[in-house]
Image: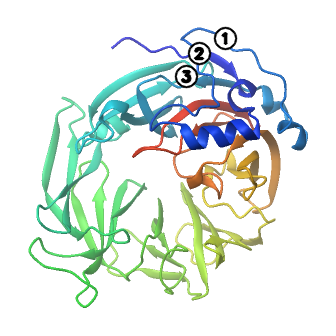
Amino acid sequence: MQPTKAPWVSVAALVLVTAAAAAASAATAPAHSPPAHMSVPPTGQIVPAPPRSSAASTVPPVHDAYASPSVVLPAGYAFDQISASPDTLLLTGEVTSTTRSQTPTCVAASVDPATLHITITAEASCDDPSVHGRTVGTVNHYIPHSNNATIQIAHVDPRTGHVSVGPVVMTYTSYSDTRPVTARGGGWLWIYDNSTTTPTTTVNQSHPGRPELLQVSAATGAVVDTVAMPALFRPIMAADSAGLWIGNSIQGTTSAALFRVSPGTATPEMVIPSTTAHTCWLLASGDHLWAGIGPTQRGACRQQTIERFDGTSPQPVFDAAAAGYDPNTVVGDQSQGLWTMQWTAPGATPPISSQEIVRIDPSTGAETVVATLPPLPIPPAQGLGLVPGQAAVLGHSLYLLEPPDGAGVTVRYAALVKIPVR
């Protein structure tokens, strides 16, 4: 497949809008199309930055990131995830024409972190782990005439590229709060579900399924352990060299806030026993785990404390009161710092707001705003700031996907912005 070259544009050309344009785009933008306020040029055409609108004049002074490099994402694809490897960035999503299909086609694209040149590298079944840059992945199938579904493990032979799918390793009931959650790290793929069952068993509130965690080799796809777990609804998970960390989210129950499961263990270890606090976010890297812990207020985590755990120790390295940004998603690591994005006016009417790029010191938990981006319409699903898969850090730059269209089955981001965060 020929590489796809996307045009360079300025951040201002992509995101400066008036309140009226924001309201119009929210009302009329069709599914999977760029928002009405965006100017998406033909390939190769440079778009000059328009004059600042009245909406822009009400926001605080803008950091140098205002003029950061940015690129329009290739048309025809619903990109919704970005991740970083040691020397490149990976964009993944679905082919737009297949997003409403029961068997959509997934797409992968590499991004040169220096030039933002985008190259489409694969279009394949979403069950193929390699399209997501992995060797092992999960395959979900719904059982006809039931509310049950199954999980199998797909494995890519690194020598031949052949994809094989193994037997069913988990059957679960598929309701809005009983769907599987996965995490990768430390050489393992972890799969959790709070309501596992057998293919023929009917599960309801009177006869709930079993909470269960699978430990799977990220290299071979072999299931090496099954761990009995407490029932956590929509938990947050992260994995590092010490094992799996699983947190009771703000949508969960009144169980303990945070557990850790060591590889090969028979039972989870309770790390934070509080029944009033919940896990707001988790980030794992190497032998470090960072967590935002806070009480639930109006469906969001407020008054968070930021904690770091090293290795297998259940005692935090630090426990710092957050400065009021209260993120729900954080990216980064010890060497590059921790980063999140927050809207400056999440409840604005009309829904338009600037974005603050916030650094969290990985050694102390201190929070600092390092950049303010021009205003955008706030997507309905992103009122709390950064969401999973929206950003990655590589080489002292934060790469941020925006703005999503907020419509359709799959989110389609329209542009990628590179923000220096040295």
- The crowding category of the residue bearing disc 2, from other C-alpha atoms within 10 Å (few below 14, some 14 to 19, many at least 20), is some
Query: Eyeballing the image, is 125 above or below 274?
Result: above
Q: Residue furthest bottom?
A: 206
Disc ID at residue 112: 3
Sequence-first tag of 1 and 2 = 2
**138 or 141, nearer to the observer:** 141
Q: Residue at x 64, y 39 (%)?
A: 24
Sequence-first tag of 3 and 1 = 1
| Secondary-structure class at tag 1 | loop
Sequence-first tag of 3 and 2 = 2
Q: Tell me the quarter of the picture where residue 355 sits.
A: top right
Disc ID at residue 79: none
Residue 382: image location, x then y, percent = 60, 53
Disc ID at residue 41: 2
Q: Amino acid at mark 2?
A: Pro
Q: Are marks 1 and 2 in contact (CB under 8 Å)?
A: yes
